[in-house]
Amino acid sequence: MIRVLVLLLGFSWAGGALAQPSPLVVPAPARECLQSFPIRPGEPLPGGLVDGQGVAMCGGVLIPTTRAAELLQADARERLHIADIELLKVQRQDLQDRLKTQGHPWVHRLIGGAVGVTIGLGVGLVVGAYYTGPGGS
């Protein structure tokens, strides 16, 4: 409910900003409104929307404020998802580049393990030779 009130306040404060030409993807039909108009309860309709007799000068669709808020949220979510996908693509490319330059991490673990086993065996053999050698018991 608070979101709707904030949206309504935003529409009322941005009255002049909302009357900007809307970006058209398809050609506008004849006598279609080329602007967005804020309509507030208890106030007269904007001058660019109706003539002196209260007759509409152009055609359009009045969308309830809550539906407009839902559409704006859906658009924002879509843009956020697109940004997330682009970020994931960049991260994936970075990981692929690192994989090409550094190799697989498990290869380094195997090499480290092999070195550890070799050192352990070497130390074990030296200690074993010391205690069981010619001077040992």
Image (cartoon, rainbow, N blue to C red):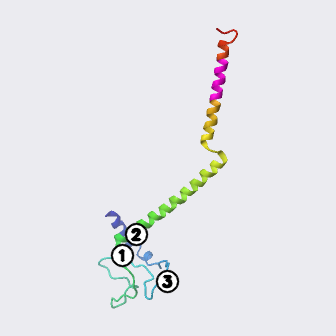
- Residue behind mark 1: 63
Q: Which image quadrant for residue 66?
A: bottom left
Q: Amino acid at mark 1?
A: Ile
Residue 64 percent coordinates (x, y): 34, 74
Query: Gap in Å between the C-alphas at discs 3 and 1?
Result: 21 Å
Is residue 65 positioned above or below 35 on the image?
above
Q: Position of residue 53 (x, y in %)?
A: 33, 91
Residue displayed at 46% across by 64% down: 78
Does the CB distance between marks 3 and 1 fall below 8 Å?
no
Q: Nearer the N terminus, badge 2 or badge 3?
A: 3
- Dominant SS of magenta comes to helix
The residue segment tinted magenta is 117-127
Query: Is 94 positioned to the left or the right of 17 in the image?
Result: right
SS for callout 1: loop
Distance Cα–Cα, label 1 vs label 2: 10 Å
In the image as oriented, which residue stretches furthest toward the bottom? 53
Of labels 3 and 1, earlier in sequence is 3
Residue positioned 65% across, 28% down in the render: 118
